[in-house]
Amino acid sequence: MKRIRQLLLKLHMYAGLLTISHLGVYAIAGLSETLKTNELPASPPAVHYVPFAPVATATDKEVADSVYRRLNIPLSSPLPPSALRRDANQNLLLEFYTLNGLDRVTVLEKERRLRIETTRTSLTSFLNNAHTAIPIDYSGPPLVRAWAMWNEFAMWCLAGFSLSGVVLWLTRPEPPWTLAVSGAGIGAFVLLWFLLR
């Protein structure tokens, strides 16, 4: 039993150390969403133009893929057909979302150029986007996939940290008031969950 406890202590410590940076990300993301009304407004988008002449016979998807290759927006992915649409003037609209913000591209075929409207997210919005990234959601650039895998690993470490902490607490004699504190925490969680549902 002592050996198992020592193994659990090591698991608890290393899982906590591996997760500590993510706990900071999760805390900032959670607080920023909770206090969203106090968030500073996003800076106005930066607009610039790039010469671009699509092939006359190209489909919308082919044009979108060509724009994607031409702009090479960091951390973005090619757009699926369902994301393609046209504005009132029949210009093709493309929106490339990344963890850093949005690049809204309008293909101005008659003018033979692209209008690119770039909006960057705030640090808190970036962390909020980053903390939800998991591998199943990201088939895009390798760097984003690497972050998503690291994020999921951290979630499992956090689960291991939490479970090992509970087991360590239950297998060691503690003062009776610790049970009351734990019960109060669980009770508050259940009550809030019930009231918010």
Image (cartoon, helix red, strand yellow):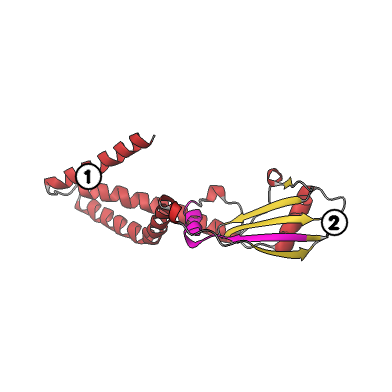
- The amino acid type found where label 1 is placed reads Ser
**Residue at the extreme right of the image, as rendered:** 56
Disc 1 designates what residue?
Answer: 182
Q: Nearer the viewer, residue 18 or 117?
A: 117
- For disc 2, the neighbor class at 10 Å (few under 14, some 14 to 19, many from 20) is few
Residue 62: percent from left, percent from top: 78, 51
Magenta-drawn stretch contains 127? yes
Is 181 rendered above or below residue 146? above
State the quadrant of the C terminus: top left
Q: Which residues are magenta?
A: 114-132
Q: Earlier in the sequence, mark 1 or mark 2?
A: 2
Residue 103: percent from left, percent from top: 65, 58
Q: Nearer the viewer, residue 60 or 145?
A: 60
Residue at 85% from the left image edge and 55% from the top image edge: 55
Helix, strand or loop at mark 2: loop
Residue at 54% from the left image edge and 59% from the top image edge: 42
Disc 2 designates what residue?
Answer: 110
Residue 120: percent from left, percent from top: 58, 61
Q: Cα distance, mark 1 to mark 2?
A: 67 Å
Q: Nearer the viewer, residue 128 or 109?
A: 109
Residue at 41% from the left image edge and 57% from the top image edge: 28
